[in-house]
Image (cartoon, rainbow, N blue to C red):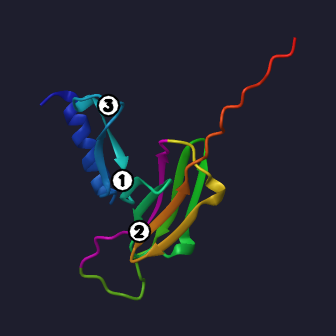
Amino acid sequence: MDLEKLKEWLEVANLYQQGQFWNVYQQKDGQSGSSAHVLQEIFPRCDVYDFENNLILEAELPGVSANEIEVTVENGQLVLKGECKTLKSTLQYYLKERPNRKFEKTITLPYPVESSKKKCSYKDGIFTIHLPKKKQEKSVLIPIVE
C-alpha cells in the first residue's frame, strides 16, 4: 500500500472515531486517482433541477424543523445552513446512529436567479426551494451620435 493511500485511510479512521460518519470521498477538480480525493460533507443530500423557468433545489432534512433552516443566495451560490437535533436527553438509547449536527452546504448555481423571489416549502422531510431564473435584459441598440 502506498503512503498516500495509507494517509487517506488514517484520516478516515480518525473521522470515524470522532463520530463524523457522514463524510465520504469525492473527487476534486475532476481529477482521478487517490491523491485527488478529499473528504467532503454531503449532508443533506440534494437534487437541483430546472422546472418551468425555475431552478429547484430539494434537500432531505428529516427531523429538522423549518425554522431551523437558513437559506442565502449570494455571488452565484446558494448556502443551506441549519441544525439537525436528534438526541433527546430523557431517552435511554440502545442504538443511536443519527447524531446531533450542524450543517452548511454550498451549491454553485448553474445560472443567475432572482433570489429575492425565492419560495421555500417543507413537507415530509423534504425542503424545497424555487428560484426563478433571472430574466436576461433584451439587447437595446444604442445610436451613435456624431
Badge 3 crowding class, 10 Å Cα cut-off, few under 14, some 14 to 19, many 20 or more, is few
Is residue 25 covered in magenta? no
* Residue labelled with disc 3: 30
The disc, 1 or 3, on the residue closer to the chain's N-terminal end is 3
- Horizontal and vertical percent for residue 109? 49, 45
- CB contact under 8 Å: marks 1 and 3: no
**Mark 3 belongs to which amino acid?**
Gly
- Horizontal and vertical percent for residue 25? 28, 44
- Horizontal and vertical percent for residue 30? 32, 31
**Mark 1 belongs to which amino acid?**
Ile
Q: Residue at x 28, y 55 (%)?
A: 16
The disc, 1 or 2, on the residue closer to the chain's N-terminal end is 1
Task: Judge from the rendering whether residue 49 lies leftward or rightward of residue 35; answer left or right.
Answer: right
* Residue labelled with disc 2: 61
Point out the stretch of residues depicted in magenta.
Answer: 95-110
**Mark 2 belongs to which amino acid?**
Leu
- Horizontal and vertical percent for residue 85? 45, 74
The CA distance from mark 1 to mark 2 is 12 Å
* Residue labelled with disc 1: 42
Q: Quadrant of residue 63?
A: bottom left
Task: Judge from the rendering whether residue 67 lies leftward or rightward of residue 122; answer left or right.
Answer: right
Decide: is 126 above or below 6.
Answer: below
- CB contact under 8 Å: marks 3 and 2: no
The disc, 3 or 2, on the residue closer to the chain's N-terminal end is 3
Total numbered circles: 3
The CA distance from mark 3 to mark 2 is 28 Å
The local secondary structure at tag 3 comes to loop
The local secondary structure at tag 1 comes to loop
In the image, 65 versus 58, the foreground residue is 58
Residue at the outermost left position: 1
Q: Residue at x 20, y 28 (%)?
A: 3
Decide: is 57 above or below 25.
Answer: below
